[in-house]
């Protein structure tokens, strides 16, 4: 398999040719949001210039074209994750809204007082707080499967927690802090045997590796467009058709209805019953273009490139005194995504980020919307994080290493 050419790909991203603090931008924060290629940017501009119209409603040419483009994006996305049909793909603002939809619609209808909900301490707040709220509303128990010392879910403890027969198991496929890749297929199989419905947070996996929801056999899969080259404000929820059929819509309004009388309403077909009002049409069009861009590269190449660059980053950071790396080791790259969280002994992560910024390098420091993991499990107030994508090269890592040495000189470490 030919390698991905990151230097060539980088030319498709206008922002990566700009300067930050007088130096060419090295963007190492794709776990927060990815940059956008000109193909995606142009597709949105073309929509507004040539066929801006509301979808579904207009019996005129540009409305029909907008509807066709919106629907095609949904169909392309369904193929991208190997859903059986686009009827199983609901467009929402992001993974957060997708998870909240499940918690509020499926959860409120199916979780009762005394029931159990199971998740883990490594979850992003988006896959933790909705379940905390659901447990509080319903008087249910929220349980957390323990983590092992090597940054993975303790499968033995998970099995014991499943004996409590939780109604739903909500697990991230890739940790946005540790980079850990969880065996969601095995976890789903275990959860189903215990009678649970399974939701996978795919925000950090869908952009970076091949996803097959039928192979995983999960009931729900949530992810965001903005982390995979698409615009902000567009994301998706995959749900098995028979599960979505039984769920009530979260929002009422136009488009999600089949009929309305003064006495009540009936719901539209899937997936439209969950998409009330005018949708983010330009976002969907950009999402479709982003999927096409990734398909052209090939997700196997995307994954291989990130394994290589992450291994290189861990090797280089591992050579620096007083630097600690979190998550699976470099010998476990098949179980680690393109994320490297680290700390520099004696220097606050926010100071590290400021030094990186002075060098034109964008990284993230903080608790990364995973406060229980960072503060309670790892014992830090914050961590620095580099995260990689298709446009990153080894040169970006070399610049990051230089920035760490600069920070150590400045702070006398």
Image: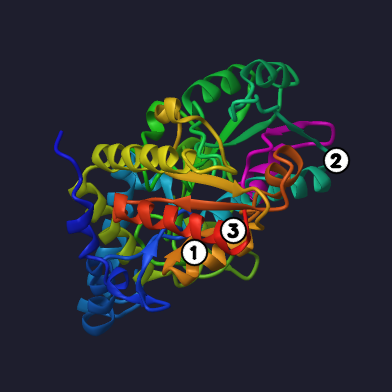
Left or right? Give the position of 236 relative to 159.
Answer: left
Which quarter of the picture shows residue 411?
bottom right
Q: Nearer the viewer, mark 3 or mark 1?
A: 1
Which quarter of the picture shows residue 155?
top right
Eyeballing the image, is 214 above or below 37? Answer: above
Residue 255, image x, y percentages: 46, 66
Q: Marks 2/1: CA distance?
A: 46 Å
Give the mark nearer the N terminus: 3 vs 1: 1
Question: Which secondary structure, mark 2?
Answer: loop
Q: Nearer the viewer, residue 333 or 276?
A: 333
Q: Any mark on residue 356, and which?
A: 1
Q: Any mark on residue 134, and which?
A: none
Question: Which secondary structure, mark 3?
Answer: strand
Eyeballing the image, is 123 above or below 251? Answer: above
Residue 89, image x, y percentages: 41, 48
x 69%, y 30%: residue: 167
Q: Any mark on residue 139, and which?
A: 2
x 50%, y 43%: residue: 320
Q: Any mark on residue 365, and which?
A: 3
Does the residue at mark 2 contact the one at mark 1 (Cβ under 8 Å)?
A: no
Left or right? Give the position of 118 relative to 211.
Answer: right
Residue 287, image x, y percentages: 33, 60
Label 2 Cα neighbours within 10 Å, binned few <14 / some 14-19 / many ≥20: some
Q: Nearer the viewer, residue 233 or 404?
A: 404
Label 1 Cα neighbours within 10 Å, binned few <14 / some 14-19 / many ≥20: many
Residue 314, image x, y percentages: 44, 39
Q: Quadrant of the N terminus?
A: top left
The region drawn magenta spans 102-124
Q: Marks 3/1: CA distance?
A: 11 Å
Res 88 seen here: yes
Residue 192 magenta? no
């Amino acid at each position: 398999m030919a390698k991905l050419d990151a230097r060539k790909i980088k030319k498709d991203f206008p922002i990566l040719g700009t300067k930050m603090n007088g130096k060419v931008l090295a963007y190492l924060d794709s776990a927060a949001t990815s940059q956008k290629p000109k193909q995606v940017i142009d597709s949105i501009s073309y929509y507004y210039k040539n066929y801006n119209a509301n979808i579904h409603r207009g019996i005129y040419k540009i409305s029909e074209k907008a509807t066709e483009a919106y629907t095609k994006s949904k169909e392309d996305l369904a193929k991208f994750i190997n859903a059986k049909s686009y009827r199983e793909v609901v467009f929402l603002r992001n993974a957060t809204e997708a998870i909240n939809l499940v918690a509020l619609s499926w959860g409120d209808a199916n979780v009762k007082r005394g029931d159990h909900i199971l998740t883990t301490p490594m979850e992003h707040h988006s896959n933790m707080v909705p379940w905390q709220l659901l447990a509080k509303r319903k008087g249910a128990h929220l349980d957390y499967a323990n983590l092992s010392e090597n940054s993975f879910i303790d499968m033995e403890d998970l099995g014991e927690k499943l004996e409590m027969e939780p109604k739903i198991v909500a697990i991230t496929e890739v940790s946005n802090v540790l980079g850990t890749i969880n065996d969601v297929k095995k976890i789903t199989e275990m959860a189903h045997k215990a009678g649970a419905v399974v939701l996978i947070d795919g925000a950090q996996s869908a952009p970076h590796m091949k996803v097959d929801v039928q192979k995983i056999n999960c009931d729900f899969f949530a992810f965001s467009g903005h982390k995979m080259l698409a615009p902000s404000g567009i994301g998706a929820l995959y749900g098995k058709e028979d599960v979505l059929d039984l769920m009530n819509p979260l929002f009422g309004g136009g488009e999600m209805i089949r009929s309305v009388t003064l006495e009540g309403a009936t719901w539209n077909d899937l997936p439209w019953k969950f998409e009330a009002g005018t949708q983010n049409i330009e976002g969907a069009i950009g999402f479709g273009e982003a999927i096409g861009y990734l398909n052209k590269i090939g997700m196997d190449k995307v994954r291989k490139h990130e394994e290589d660059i992450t291994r290189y980053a861990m090797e280089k950071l591992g050579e620096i005194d007083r630097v600690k790396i979190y998550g699976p080791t470099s010998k476990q790259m098949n179980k680690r995504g393109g994320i490297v969280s680290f700390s520099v002994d004696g220097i606050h992560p926010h100071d590290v980020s400021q030094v990186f910024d002075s060098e034109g390098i964008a990284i993230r420091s903080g608790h990364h919307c995973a406060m229980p993991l960072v503060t309670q499990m790892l014992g830090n107030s914050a961590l620095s994080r580099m995260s990689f994508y298709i446009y990153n090269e080894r040169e970006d890592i070399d610049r990051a290493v230089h920035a760490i040495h600069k920070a150590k000189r400045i702070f006398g470490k």
